[in-house]
Amino acid sequence: MSHTNKLKIFNDPIYGFITIPNELVFDLIQHPYFQRLRRISQMGMSYLVYPGAHHTRFHHALGALHLMQKAVEVLRFKGVSISSDEETALYVAIMLHDIGHGPFSHAMEHSIVEHIHHEELSLLFMNELNILFEGKLDLAIQIFKGEYKRKFMLQLISSQLDMDRMDYLKRDSFYSGVAEGNINSDRLIQMLHVVDEQLVLEEKAIYSIEKFLMARRLMYWQAYLHKTSLVAEIILTKTLKRAKELVSKGILVPCSEPLQFFLNPINRESFDRSVLQKFALLDDYDIMSALKGWQFHSDFILSSLSKMIINRDLPKVKLHTEKFDKMDIQKLRNEISSLYQISNSEVDYFLFKGKIKTLAYNKEKEPIKIIRKDKKIEDVEVYSEQLNSKAFSKPMTKYYLCYPKVLELNNQF
């Protein structure tokens, strides 16, 4: 471990100075597993739409840590008992909650390693760090897994109004320039309270909660699910899929050693400690370096897909509220197959469809609770007229269709 001064501060563009609360947190930040987050984009491929969105998971983790410090301070002021061990565990859990993200965050989830969610990988990293730090993460892991007796502590880390969401909305809004995503995290944290070990918000917070949920809804449609970001992330996953397919056929696909390892089949069952060490070496730089080389690969599909991302020359994206006509899609398939002289199965690399769905507030999933002045506790949806509207209470679904721009003139949907 480092023997340097551990009473450090970070100068953050969102909150100003962020302090490191203790030596354990400092040593965790210094560890290579955490430093790797400096090389993992927070918003995936969104920088292709919003040029400023180059912030990282490192930024976000420190921001969430800062908000957790404020939450602990507020709850203690209101008489909620939080021991020093519980306090540190909350800081560690929120700081490490996203440590399992792979390159470009959500963009490549399930692409590097199939059927493993980043939260599972975060837990694997936390368990590994717990061994290195001789059990000092025991309580943090217990809280992270939802096994600790005090439920509100997990709610501070993972719920529909947690420190994670409060930071990423404010931070992603700032770096992307999408002003609609900005929220008043200070106000929300000041309104926090705990009743019967459950997290609640004071009645006065209702308008701030409505603003928070509206901001989240708008950020999804304007940023996270922006059609250009969407198609770029899909192309990225298809590029990796093609690379894996070529490797399985014995074709050389040059790239960094960590990425080369994951071009071979890796699943949940084979993901042991040694695989975790290799995953810890993988970041955005491996992917971008590979794409720069793959654009010159002899395989037409791998080369074409890589160029799309490197040169931001992406396919056309159409969004509809209804499903696309099967006859129109088949027509496109035939045109692409003829245009590129590729097989029917290979057309899927250039033509793809799907749907995106969001729900602003889900009262069935860790609902937000309001404590009224008469001490009665209600679901925020019951209390708020705004949240009873269809925009919040019903999921919104859109269907997308992506195909090469060269076919745009012949096909109007």
Image (tube, rainbow, N blue to C red):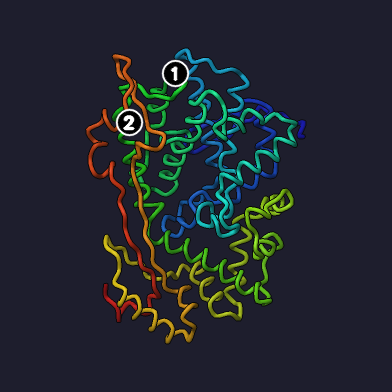
Pointer 1: residues within 10 angstroms few (<14), some, or many (20+)? few
Please report the residue visible at 29 percent of the width from the left and 14 percent of the height from the top. Answer: 374
Residue 129 in percent (x, y) is at 70, 38
Residue 28 in percent (x, y) is at 67, 36
Residue 14 in percent (x, y) is at 47, 37
* Rendered view: 308 above or below 56: below
Q: Amino acid at mark 2?
A: Ser
Pointer 2: residues within 10 angstroms few (<14), some, or many (20+)? some
Which of pointers 1 and 2 indicates the residue nearer the eye? 1
Please report the residue visible at 42 percent of the width from the left and 43 percent of the height from the top. Answer: 174
Q: Residue 333 occupies which quadrant of the picture?
A: bottom left
Which mark is drawn over residue 47? none
Asked if the residue under mark 2 is in contact with the one under mark 1, i.e. CB atoms within 8 Å, the reply is: no
Please report the residue visible at 56 percent of the width from the left and 48 percent of the height from the top. Answer: 118
Classify mark 1: helix, strand or loop: loop
* Rendered view: 395 above or below 319: above
Q: Would residue 252 be found to the left or right of residue 56 on screen?
A: right
Q: CA distance from mark 1 to mark 2?
A: 23 Å
Q: Would residue 157 be found to the left or right of residue 100 on screen?
A: left
In the picture, the quarter occupied by the C terminus is bottom left
Please report the residue visible at 45 percent of the width from the left and 33 percent of the height from the top. Answer: 162
Instruction: Return the residue at label 1.
Output: 196
Classify mark 2: helix, strand or loop: helix
Instruction: Return the residue at label 2.
Output: 208
Q: Amino acid at mark 1?
A: Asp
* Rendered view: 5 above or below 266: above
Q: Would residue 195 be found to the left or right of residue 3 on screen?
A: left
Q: Would residue 363 be found to the left or right of residue 290 on screen?
A: left
